[in-house]
Image (cartoon, rainbow, N blue to C red):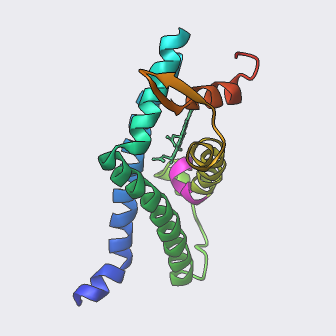
Amino acid sequence: MSNNGLLKSSLAKKYMMALTGLFLCLFLVGHLLGNLQLFITGPEGAETFNLYAKFMTTNPLIKVLSYLTYASVLFHAIDGLVLTIQNRKARPVKYVVEKGSANSSWSSRNMALLGTILLVFIVTHMQHFWYVMHFGEVGHVLIGGESIKDLHTVVVDFFNPSFN
Ligand code: HEM
C-alpha cells in the first residue's frame, strides 16, 4: 500500500481517532484541575481564577495547545463521522444475529450518539464562556495595578446567579 493509501485507510483513521480522543481526555483533566480553583472562596479565589484565565488566554504555549484542542475536537468529530459512514457502506447487509453486549459495553457501542451529545455540549459551553471571554463584553477587575477580564463573575453568575 502506498503511503498515501495508508494515510487514507480506515486503520490510520482509527489511530487518529484514538490519538485525538486521548489528547481531549488529557485536556479535560487539565481543564478540571484549573476549574477546581472556582472552589477557592473569597476575593482571593476570584483573583486566583481571573489570573489563571488571563494566563490561559495570553500565554503563547497555551495558545498553541488551545488551537490543538480546537483542531482535535473538529478532527475527532469529522473523522468519527467518516468512519461510521465507511463502516455502514462496507456492510450494507445487517448481521442476522447481533449480540454486541456479549463482548462490549453499551457506551462503546454508542460512541457516535455519546460523541454527538458531547459535541452539542462543547459548542454551547464555548458559546457561554469562551466566546464571552474572547469576544463578549466582560467586566474588568484591578489586580496588581493591572485591569484584567473578570471571567470569575461570568462563571459564578452562570452557575449561581444569586451568589454575587
Ligand atoms: C463545570 C464544569 C466546567 C466549567 C466551570 C468550565 C469552564 C470553562 C471556562 C470558564 C472556559 C473559558 C476559558 C477561556 O476562554 O479562557 C471553558 C472553555 C472550554 N471548555 Fe469548559 N468548563 C467545564 C466543563 C467542560 C467540559 C466537561 C468540557 C468538554 C467535554 C469542556 C470543554 C471546554 C473547551 C473545549 C473549552 C475551550 C478551551 C480553550 O479555549 O482552550 N469544559 N470552560
In the displayed structure, would residue 18 be above or below residue 56?
below
The residue lying toward the viewer, choosing from 21 and 62, is 62
Identify the residue at the far top of this view. 42
Q: How many marks?
A: 0
* Horizontal arrangement in the rendering, residue 4 relative to residue 112 (left or right): left
* Horizontal arrangement in the rendering, residue 71 relative to residue 162 (left or right): left
Q: What is the x, y in percent for residue 28?
A: 44, 40
Q: What is the x, y in percent for residue 8?
A: 36, 82
In the picture, the quarter occupied by the N terminus is: bottom left
The residue lying toward the viewer, choosing from 141 and 36, is 141
The residue lying toward the viewer, choosing from 74 and 136, is 136
Membership of 109 in magenta stretch: yes
Instruction: Report which quarter residue 12 is drawn in.
Output: bottom left
Residue in the image at 46% along x and 22% along y:
143
In the displayed structure, would residue 2 be above or below residue 141?
below
The residue lying toward the viewer, choosing from 93 and 149, is 149
In the displayed structure, would residue 22 be above or below residue 77?
above
Residue 161 visible to an observer of this rendering: yes
Q: What is the x, y in percent for residue 13?
A: 38, 71
Residue in the image at 60% along x and 81% along y:
93
Q: What is the x, y in percent for residue 54?
A: 44, 35
Residue extent of the magenta highlight: 106-112
Identify the residue at the far front of this view. 145
In the displayed structure, would residue 135 be above or below residue 75?
above
Residue in the image at 31% along x and 80% along y:
7
Instruction: Report which quarter residue 140 is drawn in.
Output: top right
Residue in the image at 54% along x and 51% along y:
101
Identify the residue at the far bottom of this view. 2
